[in-house]
Amino acid sequence: MAAAGPVRSVLKRALAAIVVLAVLAFPLVFARPFPRHVMIMIFLYGALATAWNVLAGYCGQISLGHAVYFGIGAYTSTLLIREAALTPWLGMPAGAALAVLVSQVIGYPVFRLRGHYFAIATIGVGEIVQTLFINWDWAGGARGLFVPIKRPDSLLNLQFHESKAVYYYIALGLLALALGVTHWLERSRRGYVFRAIREDQDAAASVGVHVAREKHVAIAVSAALTALGGTFWAQYVLFIDPESVFPLSLSILISLVAVLGGVGSLWGPVLGAAILVPLSEGTRVLLGGTGKALDLVIYGALIMLIAVFQPSGVIGLARRFRRDRRQATGAAQASSA
């Protein structure tokens, strides 16, 4: 039994290595566009849900307006490409910086609210921003904006018309960045502070935590990571409009991915994306126009099922199964002794 621990550790590392190699080799094995597209969407929504998880899962501030930061990232990079001919690689940090600035402006009034009132306020902010962009002619208005097509394919311009393989690795990089930042926060002193605010912000304040400042830090990190995803999306589809980058349905989908996998955990949002994105994309392809809005029905049903039967998500279910198995093993060993 003493060797069980090291053996289990070696098996875990071997399994992790196999998964990493499989992910890296996927676009080399599956050359068809659709499987690559599904994986790109898994990485993108995994990154977006991980960003949302920083604010909602760790700090306890449930935002239903995160499409604001996604859209800001998409519009900032696209406008810089169109008006100043800048590379999207400069548009990414510019969009992230603007998203952080907007998040701080939004945070001052909405962080005075708690619970459901905070969530409702973020919905209102999202609707206001979407309406503004619909009516702003300088940003394309309701017609939207096309990203100028650059040829030949180039990493500098972040455009690849012949193959989605490079998009695959860039999306994977965004997910790795979001996970890396979250992992660092999770293990840092600030991560403990975030969780203290989530559990009881009055108690956290009573022991010296500057609650307002920490909330602003959480939303800044979350907004910046979300904006990076928006820039990537704009370059991937080469067209944006207020209905595609600012809708409430996008904010709900981002939050649902995290909730399905398990909020407040590192890998929960990734698991949620791995479950929900193929379901959504498969429904869209199989049913086409006849399945219009069916994805919203699926999202609503999943929200109800998770809320009633498994509030801690897939991660919570796995942890409970592992705990029950350990208890059963311990009981069996005790009875045999």
Image (cartoon, rainbow, N blue to C red):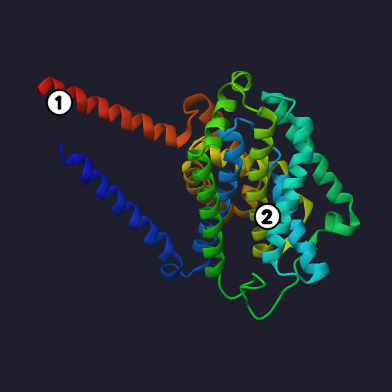
Determine whether, in the image, residue 63 is placed left or right of residue 264: right
Q: Which residue is mark 1?
A: 333
| Residue 240 in view of the camera | no
**Where residue 162 appears, x then y in whole percent?**
58, 76
Above or below, 151 against 23 in this view is below
Q: Secondary structure at mark 1?
A: helix
Residue closest to the far left: 337
Q: Where residue 108 is drawn, which disc sits there?
A: none
**Identity of the amino acid at label 1?**
Gln
Residue closest to the far front: 208
Q: Secondary structure at mark 2?
A: helix
Q: Residue at x 49, y 68 (%)?
A: 32
Residue closest to the far bottom: 152
Determine whether, in the image, residue 18 is placed left or right of residue 285: left
Q: CA distance from mark 2 to mark 1?
A: 53 Å
Q: Which quadrant would the C terminus be assigned to in this image?
A: top left
Tell which of 23 and 56 is nearer to you: 56
Q: Residue at x 44, y 67 (%)?
A: 30
**Identity of the amino acid at label 2?**
Gly
Q: Which residue is mark 2?
A: 230
- Quarter occupied by residue 256: top right
**Where residue 315 appears, x then y in whole percent?**
43, 36
**Where residue 108 appears, x then y in whole percent?**
77, 33
